Amino acid sequence: MQRIFCQRDCPDACSLLVTPEGEVRGDPHHPVTRGFACIKAMNFLKYYKSERRVLYPHIREGGRYKKVSWNEAISLIALKLRSILKEYGPREVLVVNYSGNSGLLSFNYPLRLFYALNATVIDYTICDEAGEVAVSLHYGKRYGAFPDDMENAEMLAIWGANIASSSVHAYRIAVELKRKGVPIWTIDPRRTRTSLLGRHIRPKPGSDSVLAMGVSWYIINEFGVDLEFIKRYTIGFEAYKELVSKFPPDKVEAITGVPKGEFRDLARDYVERRPSISYIGVGLQKTRYGAEAVRAISLIPALVGVHRGFFYCNSVRDFDTDYLKGKNLGNPSVVNMLDIGPLLSSGKFKFLYIYGCNPAITFPRSDLIRDGLAREDLYVVVHDVVWSETAEMADIVLPATSMFEQFDVVGSWWHPYVGYSSQVIEPAGESKPNWWVTQEIARKIGLDVPELYEDPIEALKRALRSSKMLEGGLDALMEQGYVKLKYPPKDSYQTPSGKIEFYSSKALEMGYSPLPNVGWDVEVDGYPFKLISSSVPEKTSTQDMMPEDLVKRDSIYISRDDAVSLGLEEDGLVRVTPTNGSSIIATISIDDNLLRGVVWARRGSRFIIGTLNDLLTNEKQKIAEGNTLNSNYVRIERV
Ligand SMILES: Nc1nc2c(c(=O)[nH]1)N[C@H]1C(S)=C(S)[C@@H](COP(=O)(O)OP(=O)(O)OC[C@H]3O[C@@H](n4cnc5c(=O)[nH]c(N)nc54)[C@H](O)[C@@H]3O)O[C@H]1N2
Ligand SMILES: Nc1nc2c(c(=O)[nH]1)N[C@H]1C(S)=C(S)[C@@H](COP(=O)(O)OP(=O)(O)OC[C@H]3O[C@@H](n4cnc5c(=O)[nH]c(N)nc54)[C@H](O)[C@@H]3O)O[C@H]1N2
Ligand SMILES: [Mo]
């Protein structure tokens, strides 16, 4: 049986076996995959064989796509690129990439071309980055609990994550814990499959930093902190205590909508059931005070004496990814990816290269992204595995190999294993890996930079060579298949003081509040519904949609009480108007899992008219200019 490592942007980064019959299974020997794969992976081969697959290079001519040879496609791209560089300069060339493929090579290597050109690259702010910075302010490196820590937990609190959908192997651990009688808590405004595992706290969305204060208040004032631990491993506790004292239970109850008895019980479990572990999801972080909430939740273990008793993002690696992406080759300009819609639609940039990303659906103000892609004076090249919504608007579409058809090195942002994924299937049609395409473009425009043509295996070797976490580098990976990374110990803290800093000196230096800046989303006048969205089991972001799924249109989900008060029935049509001046038309779905005042949509929703992300703003969090995808308010009317 042949094996690959899943290259989707998912915490589980599974080891997948392809049987001789062409089925995909979870590797029974891999310590985290343990013999089962998610529903998406089981359908991968069907998906990659579907008619959505891009098999050949295509150029758009008179509104239709025409098949061309690679040579024609690359020549045309080189011609355009050269003339745009000459006429407008390199800053008008933009590369957009993100989470289509998280393999080290697939993600990074193409960037070499754009670094060497001194073009414009993006800042990756659309997912979990603000929360990563948040944790590092107090802990140094951001690693926390691993799967085995979860398995040994005496209590698990899952904040703003629906792991039944987004991390099925973490969900399985949670199910095992429940079976053993370990208390599980879920903090999510929605009822989900995950929340059915235990006690469910339902805060108003966007109020988690306040809720974390409420939990901390009870720990400090009623159940007792671990003073020994605090003295030995932390600094700034007195200042933190002062902050928490400003959020007594009644105030927290009023802001979050959670009865105080509930978060009191949660506080008691944090203290009495140690090691208690918090799984902090990306969902709650995509709010105006999201990174602040991540800070406050991550500090709860420091109160009760558990070293790094949280999981948020474990992708701490000492690989030389700067080398892989060619950071030394130039000094590109950087723009926040949340701003791409407004920038493109206002006429900025003349050449756009997109790989591993579907911004026409996934970026905020996707309506403006699509306006931009439609510009006559913008040349758009899309390299993708399938005819994504973005590919369908490109001037040139290039076929990409799927994860089964290319080699790469794949890590996880949850578990500590890194794998070498081999090519196990011949490339479909004329599809080519990401690194190959930018090599060819560089060659055609005649760039004299040796790194642009470096053999990708050599590049990987060099990037892993000096790693202390991965002994033996790429050779070890290729020989053993996967290797467990050596992380620093849980009780080492890479902050200026060497301790957990409740009061963060690094935050101060970076212009952020040294203590979590506790805040919450407030309703906007005239826009009574909070719109949130999240991942669903059967697709990864916009991937895995079969041709028959694409015909269907998504709904806006609303609570029964709200539907009644608006006079709406199941499948009725509504216009949804956000604060940003756009609007969409969709069907309504009545959902008993929602709180009043909250509406929900599946991530990547496409409605009868418009898409979900047309409704979002590009407002940023203060920390790391992170996204606020879950902090939008809308008005809903029957049409
Ligand atoms: N099947 C599948 N798996 C995936 C993905 C996928 O699309 N599909 N995507 C992958 C990627 S890129 C990522 S980033 C992760 C994301 O996966 P998760 O970390 O689970 O995050 P989300 O799916 O964004 O949202 C999870 C939950 O957060 C809740 N939520 C929303 N706002 C708030 C709030 O203010 N407070 C609280 N407490 N909860 C809130 C939502 O109701 C939702 O149930 O999953 C990865 N795994
Ligand atoms: N409303 C709302 N919007 C969101 C979110 C949300 O929760 N709500 N979540 C945000 C988050 S967490 C994320 S991570 C982003 C994800 O947004 P994107 O980065 O746009 O991710 P995908 O939708 O998975 O699209 C990736 C594209 O890459 C292609 N691809 C896959 N493998 C390869 C490959 O090897 N080579 C090439 N060239 N292409 C490949 C896929 O076919 C797909 O078209 O969306 C964000 N947008
Ligand atoms: Mo993400």
Image: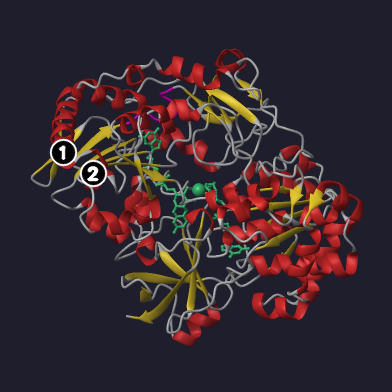
Q: Position of residue 68 (x, y in %)?
A: 15, 29
Callout 2: few (<14), some (14-19), or many (20+) C-alpha neighbours within 10 Å?
many
Q: Residue at x 32, y 23 (%)?
A: 436
Q: What is the C-alpha distance between the residues marked 2 and 1?
A: 8 Å
Q: Which residues are drawn in magenta?
A: 400-406
- The numbered mark at residue 92 is 2
Residue 97 lies, in percent from the top left, at 38, 41
From the top left corner, tell me how far across and down residue 293 is, in percent.
64, 61
Mark 1 Cβ inside 8 Å of ligand 2: no
State the image quarter where residue 66 is shown: top left
State which tag comes first along the sequence, 2 or 1: 1
Residue at (58, 50) in percent of width and height? 165
| Residue at the disc numbered 1 | 84
Left or right: 407 in relation to 553: right
- Dominant SS type (magenta): loop
Above-or-below relation of 394 to 286: above
407 or 570: nearer the eye?
407
Give SS at disc 2. Answer: helix
